[in-house]
Image (cartoon, rainbow, N blue to C red):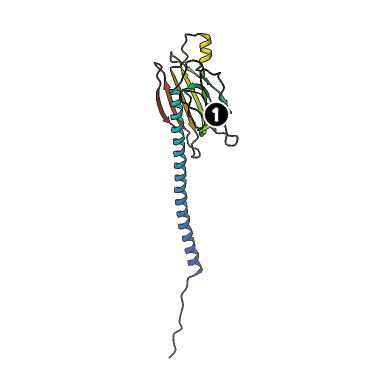
């Protein structure tokens, strides 16, 4: 009696290729899902950073302008300017909101505070810097100097609007010139509005605008703020 031959059955080349193709498709789908998830996480973190920068900057500006001082040798100067095609307004004024960042520095009742704007030569985005120099009315006035403290970056626009007692908008304000023209004129605007426009970290996304304002209806500042896209 002859024994039956033992037959072995393996995978054909076609089956192996099909299995590899299916495996590749599954891996591609999984990788795409993970990649999308990580991209969303990165975008969320970037937008959160923008909101944090805007909150800190607006709080600081509101506090400084809310403590504006126009007594002896006090002044307020706001200038409209551009860097490239972008609005990059600046403002300089005396305030009682001096920040002592150096242990060796003595606390002063007044400060000359200014906000300046710089453009990044590579990205062409704007950065907002705060300068704070101790100021005493008994001393001669000195311009604010130094690098300043970086408040926020990644900006496309920094805009200031001044409203006089008639409700008219002005792009600039100079209390010294106003006083020279008329010593009885109102040196303080009724309201100052500050607007910061951030570039959206999402490619092709809409920029994000944050706005705040300080009102001086009776000489006492009132702060309001809003956010819009």
Q: In this view, does 154 lie above or below 112?
A: below
Spot occupied by residue 168 in the image (x, y as percentages of width and height): 46, 15
Query: Which of the two residues, 107 or 7, is positioned nearer the viewer here?
Result: 107
Q: Where is residue 127 in the image (x, y as percent from the top left)?
A: 53, 32
Point out the image quarter for the C terminus.
top left
Q: Quadrant of residue 44?
A: top left
In this view, 228 is above or below 77: below
Q: Out of 115 and 103, give the one closest to the viewer.
A: 103
Label 1 secondary element? strand
Query: What residue sits right under mark 1 in the picture?
Result: 117
Residue 39 is situated, as x and y percent measured from the top left of the image, at 47, 46
Count of all numbered marks drawn on residues in the image: 1
Q: In this view, does 123 lie above or below 131?
A: below
The residue under the point 46% across, 38% down is: 49
Residue at the image position 57 percent from the left and 26 percent from the top: 145
Task: Examine the image and state in which quarter residue 217 appears.
Answer: top left
Instruction: Tell whether 1 sits left or right of 131.
Output: left
Quarter of the N terminus within the rendering:
bottom left
Q: Residue extending furthest right?
A: 121
Residue nearer the viewer, 143 or 12 = 143
Residue at 55% x, 29% y: name it.
117
Badge 1: residue crowd in 10 Å (few <14, some 14–19, many ≥20): many
Residue 85 at x, y = what percent? 57, 28
User: Residue 140 vs residue 194: left or right?
Assistant: right
């Amino acid at each position: 009696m002859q024994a039956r031959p033992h037959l072995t059955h393996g995978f054909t080349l076609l089956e192996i290729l099909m299995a590899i193709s299916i495996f590749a498709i599954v891996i591609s789908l999984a990788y795409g899902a993970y990649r999308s998830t990580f991209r969303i996480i990165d975008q969320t973190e970037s937008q959160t950073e923008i909101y944090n920068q805007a909150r800190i900057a607006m709080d600081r500006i509101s506090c400084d302008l809310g403590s504006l001082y126009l007594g002896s040798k006090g002044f307020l100067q706001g200038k409209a300017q551009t860097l490239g095609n972008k609005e990059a307004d600046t403002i300089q004024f005396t305030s009682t909101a001096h920040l002592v960042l150096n242990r060796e520095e003595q606390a002063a009742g007044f400060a000359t505070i200014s906000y300046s704007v710089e453009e990044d030569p590579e990205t062409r985005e704007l950065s907002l810097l705060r300068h704070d120099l101790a100021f005493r009315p008994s001393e001669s006035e000195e311009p604010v100097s130094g690098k300043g403290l970086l408040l926020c970056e990644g900006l496309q626009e920094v805009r200031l609007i001044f409203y006089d007692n008639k409700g008219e908008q002005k792009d600039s304000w100079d209390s010294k010139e106003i006083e020279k023209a008329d010593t009885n004129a109102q040196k303080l605007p009724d309201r100052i509005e500050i607007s910061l426009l951030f570039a959206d970290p999402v490619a092709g996304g809409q920029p994000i605008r944050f706005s705040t304002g300080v009102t001086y209806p009776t000489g006492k500042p009132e702060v309001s703020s809003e956010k819009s896209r």
